Image (cartoon, rainbow, N blue to C red):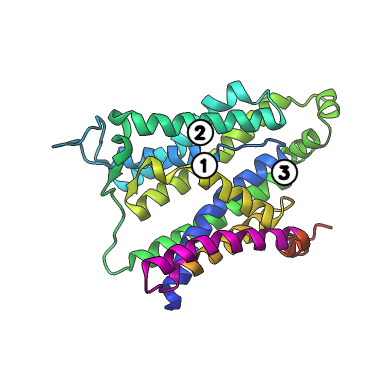
């Protein structure tokens, strides 16, 4: 097994998905919102990047819009699209609580998935958009470049959330989470703050979506299914919901395990099929063990000084 590609893959995808997990941690553990549609903001960012940078349609292409703009224009468009989708879906749903909010956000994500799958004039239907523009500076290995970009983006998101949560705005979020009635009594606008959190946390998710589109050079509906949402939730539970560091550690641990299984050189198709099944079983067992002893949550609490 070659170790370098494994490390590069873990850093790239682990850091990218850690951005989603940190955003979910802020929404759930600090904002008190259960979001089961987080993949939709990831898809909105990826598709925005693809549409802005894609060449105009030709031949058998069925999409209508391709602006052939440079990659940095796509990076700017991705968080705007994710925040716009969060504002569109957050406004009618954030008055809901608990499982009602979870089901509604999940339904919005499925509506977007169905729209991208059936509306060929936007994203070329089930075929998706391929050969997406990616930065390719001469003399630099692209795998290392994207891994470094993912790590920098993850660290920037982590620092931003830490400063936000340590500010008076973060303390207002904690007050709303702990006691809505008391927070409302002292003049906190609960609906406005929850809406702002919802939109604010969608911005780094949109940037992660743009990075995903750059790396894969493909966006298609089957890449943005509910499995991504479940992966992020599992990572959050593994790492513990109490700290930002826990979200990062949980995601890196989960992605490392998945990449280890994928990196093993299976000699037959049957062996690969068995490995895929075993991966799910072992993932479940690890999930149970970590829930029992919560090592990542303890490590993250010690790191942050949280009791």
| Above or below: residue 65 compared with residue 256 | above
Q: Nearer the viewer, mark 3 or mark 2?
A: 2
Say whether residue 301 is visible.
Answer: no
Q: Which residue is mark 1?
A: 226
Q: Nearer the viewer, mark 3 or mark 1?
A: 1
Q: Which part of the image, by quadrant, shows the N terminus?
A: bottom left
CA separation in Å, label 3 and label 1 = 21 Å
Q: Which part of the image, by quadrant, shows the C terminus?
A: bottom right
Q: Which residue is mark 2?
A: 109
Along the line of sight, which residue is nearer the eye, 155 or 243?
243
CA separation in Å, label 1 and label 2 = 8 Å
Classify mark 2: helix, strand or loop. Answer: helix
Classify mark 3: helix, strand or loop. Answer: helix
Q: Which residue is mark 3?
A: 29
**Residue at 71% from the left image edge and 32% from the top image edge:** 98
User: Horizontal and vertical percent for residue 241?
Assistant: 71, 50
User: Horizontal and vertical percent for residue 286?
Assistant: 66, 63
Q: Which stretch appears magenta?
A: 262-291
User: Horizontal and vertical percent for residue 111?
Assistant: 47, 28
């Amino acid at each position: 097994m070659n170790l370098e590609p494994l490390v590069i893959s873990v850093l790239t995808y682990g850091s990218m998905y850690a951005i989603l997990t940190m955003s979910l941690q802020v929404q759930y553990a600090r904002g008190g919102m259960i979001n089961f549609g987080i993949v939709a903001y990831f898809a909105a960012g990826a598709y925005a990047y693809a549409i802005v940078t894609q060449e105009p349609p030709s031949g058998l292409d069925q999409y209508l819009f391709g602006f052939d703009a440079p990659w940095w224009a796509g990076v700017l468009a991705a968080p705007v699209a994710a925040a716009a989708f969060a504002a569109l879906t957050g406004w009618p749903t954030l008055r809901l609580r608990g499982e009602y909010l979870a089901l509604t956000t999940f339904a919005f994500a499925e509506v977007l998935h169905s729209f991208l799958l059936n509306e060929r004039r936007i994203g070329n239907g089930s075929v998706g958009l391929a050969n997406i523009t990616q930065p390719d500076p001469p003399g630099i290995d692209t795998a290392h470049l994207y891994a470094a970009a993912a790590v920098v983006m993850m660290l920037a998101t982590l620092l931003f959330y830490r400063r936000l949560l340590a500010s008076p705005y973060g303390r207002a979020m904690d007050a709303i989470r702990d006691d809505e009635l008391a927070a409302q009594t002292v003049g906190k606008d609960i609906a406005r703050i929850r809406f702002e959190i919802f939109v604010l946390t969608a911005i780094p998710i949109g940037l992660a979506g743009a990075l995903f589109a750059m790396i894969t050079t493909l966006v298609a509906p089957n890449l943005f299914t509910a499995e991504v949402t479940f992966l992020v939730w599992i990572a959050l539970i593994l790492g513990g919901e109490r700290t930002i560091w826990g979200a990062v550690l949980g995601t890196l641990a989960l992605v490392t395990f998945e990449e280890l299984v994928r990196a093993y050189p299976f000699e037959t198709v049957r062996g690969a099929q068995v490995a895929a099944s075993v991966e799910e079983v072992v993932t479940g067992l690890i999930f149970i063990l970590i829930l029992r002893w919560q090592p990542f949550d303890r490590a993250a609490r010690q790191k942050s000084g949280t009791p």
